[in-house]
Image (cartoon, rainbow, N blue to C red):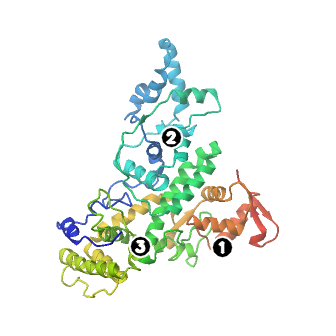
Amino acid sequence: MTLSLDVIKLRSLLSKKKHETGKVADILPFVATNGKDLNNDFGDLIGEYVRQICGHVVKKKPASKDQLEFEDPLISQLTGQIEFKNESQIDLERFLRQYLYSQNNNMKVFHPYIYNFIPVPEKDTYRKYAIFLSEILVQDEIEMKNIFTNKNADDILTELVLKNLELKAINNSDSRKYQLLLPFLSSLYKEDIMFISKYQDYFLSNFTLLTHFYSFMYICQLLLKFERFEKGEYSEASTIYFALEWEAVSKRRKASEAEGFQGLKKKLPHLFVHVHTMSQLSHIQSETAKENPSFLTYRDIHDQIKEDQEMNYNYLNDLKIWIQDYSKLFLSDDEIISESPTNIESAMGILFDSIKKGTNTEVAERYGKKLEGFGGKTFIKNRGSLGQVLNINQEMLLLLTTVCVKNERMPVNKLFEEFSKRGVNFDRLSKKAIIELFDSLNILDKKSDSGDAQYVKPIL
């Protein structure tokens, strides 16, 4: 593909002095408003997430408890398959209600197929996030879909219930909305989900948490890549440090320094600016006529033109013109950057700095805070005077250990490498605490005190 910036299209797109990404593929579901964040509500979107994977739609949950007592669509669907007297119907409905729902009217997930029936709250945000996650974590992976469409059951009652629960297919011919930028994380997620799906009870207990982890990590890793501009490495995880929930943390620990959440937090307002900078850079003349032109990262552009001197020259000239045009639209005279870039790398940096100046500070901050909403209190914890740190509790640590070790024992040092591949790093003191925990749980084979001579046993 020949890269030639479509300056005319960009002038038209931003002529109203409002930041727009145009038709370029979206990479995140965020908007810079004060709307609903996920915080601790990640589980509320898991049903819609599964339906997006499977291509299913389900009736919405009744609005009130009174309606639930008489009009529940699942119970109506099940009882509609059976002929009986009125008295028997009341007893059956009562039994099914106890079987399907907990006391607070949340659905009991006793089989992967049931995820399809968990209703989504009446908020478009949840559906948008669910679409985003299904497209960047799963794509159209048939094996993943089969986990949630297979009705095989180990007991007659579950088999009977599943047999009589049907879903409608989504009539969705639209093209994909979100573009995957970190395929290595998507591959690891699918690998880990497929592994725990072999153990149904464990899967039902941990599917939501593992999906939450990968969702949060995907966005954190994107920001870290963007901050590296053309040097961003999209095929492996960048280093970021977590602290264990049960350990004491001081200001000299890596999790509380720039390599932990505090460093990430300072970059959050840049996320909006990066998205709009790269969206503008992605307006390529040969692509803008398409319905969804590809989103090009700084690295994509750099790698495509670095060996082609003519393309490099033409794209740089176009970019210089666009920087001037953007500056006239959005910046005051004293904000305009007078430096003339001499190469693509400096030109992309100047465009970023210009858009940063031309963006409302509150807008950029609200957009970046959406990442915090994805982490919620599960992966971000306030540690008093240290502020927020990235957090791993024992449940999450053992889940990560399970999916990394799988079926064969693994050297401790190798396990920490597997954690790092998934974006989770620990400093020396945290590693020591982890080894002590494994020893207390009897999942550590100790040949010596050396990390290479200590093995972690499979948990499943």
Q: Which of marks 1 and 2 is in front?
A: 2
Q: Nearer the viewer, mark 3 or mark 2?
A: 2
Question: In the figure, 237 relative to 351: above or below?
Answer: above
Q: Name the residue carrying label 1.
A: 429
Disc 2 is placed on an element classified as helix
Mark 3: few, some, or many residues within 10 Å (few <14, many ≥20)?
some
Q: Name the residue carrying label 3.
A: 267
Mark 3 or mark 2, earlier in chain? 2
Residue 96 placement (x, y as % from top left) = 53, 26
Q: Name the residue carrying label 2.
A: 115
Residue 387 is left or right of residue 59, and the answer is right
The extreme top residue here reads 85
* 17 or 373, nearer to the observer: 17
Residue 323 is left or right of residue 99, and the answer is left
Mark 1 or mark 3, earlier in chain? 3
Amino acid type at image mark 2: Tyr
Residue 155 is left or right of residue 15, and the answer is right
Amino acid type at image mark 3: Lys
Q: Quadrant of residue 275?
A: bottom left
Disc 3 is placed on an element classified as helix
- Residue drawn where x is 36% and y is 62% of the image: 294
Q: Which mark is residue 145?
A: none
Q: How far apart are marks 1 and 3 (CA)?
A: 26 Å
Split into 4 quadrants, where in the image is the N terminus? bottom left
* 435 or 24, nearer to the observer: 24
